[in-house]
């Protein structure tokens, strides 16, 4: 029996939903199980269908994508969230990350990269559009990391785990790379979360960069 990655897709433009659906379903391992025209519908569909990933636009009527992401993570934490949007403003990114999104992608992303991002997030990884990564890096360079306070004391293993999280690796992939069990990786990651004061992988990656603990690769 074939296992599909199931997606709920939310965008207030029907043509955008149709095009995105066609791109995703060109991959035989992905199936769009529901479409929503606003954030309220998206939250309801996720509760009903329990998809692996919710792919949300930021600007939607009735409830925007960031608020929908927050509700989805509260009501259906097993569903990962990717924001797909035209907004490249850092504040939008950070609000989405705080809401629990595992990915933030611009709508001009190549089709192949979108499919790869969905698979990465579905397997427990995190993704951030390279353009947005560049913006964050430039902001850190111009503003200086010192504005974010001294780095927390993390172990070398926690730093290695954080670096692989920043590279978009899932816990399973991190475990294989570091020759650890998935449970040990999860423990290291939870310790790092507490030290960084974050609650998600994407927050951890951004905060770890802000604190000078990891590098963000903009070439991938």
Image (cartoon, grey):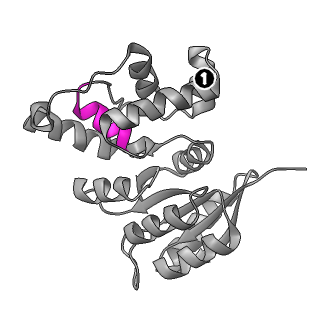
Q: Residue 130's quadrant in the figure?
A: top left
For image coordinates 28% across by 31% down, the residue present is 209
Q: Where 142 sits versus 159, above or below?
A: below
Which residue has dot 1 on it? 175
Q: Please, what is the dominant secondary structure of the magenta stretch?
A: helix
Q: Where 21 sits versus 192, above or below?
A: below
Q: Is residue 91 visible?
A: yes
- Residue 214 location, x and y as percent? 32, 25
For image coordinates 65% across by 56% down, the residue present is 52
Q: Where 116 sits versus 17, above or below?
A: above
Q: Is residue 220 visible?
A: no
Dot 1 falls on a residue whose secondary structure is helix
For image coordinates 43% across by 55% down, the residue present is 100
Q: Nearer the viewer, residue 77 or 108?
A: 77
Q: Residue furthest right?
A: 1
- Residue 196 location, x and y as percent? 31, 36
Q: Residue furthest bottom?
A: 62
In reply to whether residue 15 is colored magenta, the answer given is no
Q: Is residue 102 left or right of residue 85?
A: right
Q: Residue 128's quadrant in the figure?
A: top left
Q: Nearer the viewer, residue 34 or 44?
A: 44
- Residue 153 location, x and y as percent? 28, 21
Q: Nearer the viewer, residue 174 or 120?
A: 174
Q: Residue 218's quadrant in the figure?
A: top left
Q: Is residue 214 left or right of residue 70?
A: left
Q: Is residue 103 left or right of residue 9?
A: left
For image coordinates 70% across by 52% down, the residue present is 27
Q: Residues within 10 Å of mark 1 (few under 14, many from 20)?
A: some
- Residue 86 location, x and y as percent? 34, 63
The span picked out in magenta is 203-212
């Amino acid at each position: 029996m074939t296992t599909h990655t199931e997606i709920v897709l939310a965008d207030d433009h029907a043509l955008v939903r149709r095009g995105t659906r066609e791109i995703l379903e060109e991959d035989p391992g992905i199936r769009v199980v529901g479409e929503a025209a606003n954030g309220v519908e998206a939250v309801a569909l996720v509760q009903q269908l329990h998809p692996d990933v919710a792919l949300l636009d930021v600007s939607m009527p009735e409830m925007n994508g960031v608020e929908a992401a927050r509700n989805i993570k509260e009501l259906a934490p097993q569903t990962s969230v990717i924001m797909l949007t035209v907004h490249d403003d850092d504040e939008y990114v950070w609000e989405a990350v705080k809401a629990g999104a595992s990915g933030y992608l611009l709508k001009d992303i190549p089709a192949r990269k979108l499919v790869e991002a969905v698979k990465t997030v579905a397997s427990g990884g995190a993704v951030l559009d390279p353009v947005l990564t560049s913006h964050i890096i430039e902001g850190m360079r111009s503003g200086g990391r010192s504005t974010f306070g001294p780095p927390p004391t993390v172990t070398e293993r926690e730093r290695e785990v954080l670096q692989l999280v920043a590279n978009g690796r899932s816990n399973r992939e991190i475990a294989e790379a570091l020759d650890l069990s998935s449970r040990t990786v999860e423990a290291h990651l939870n310790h790092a979360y507490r030290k960084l004061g974050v609650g998600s992988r994407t927050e951890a990656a951004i905060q770890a960069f802000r604190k000078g603990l990891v590098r963000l690769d903009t070439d991938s």
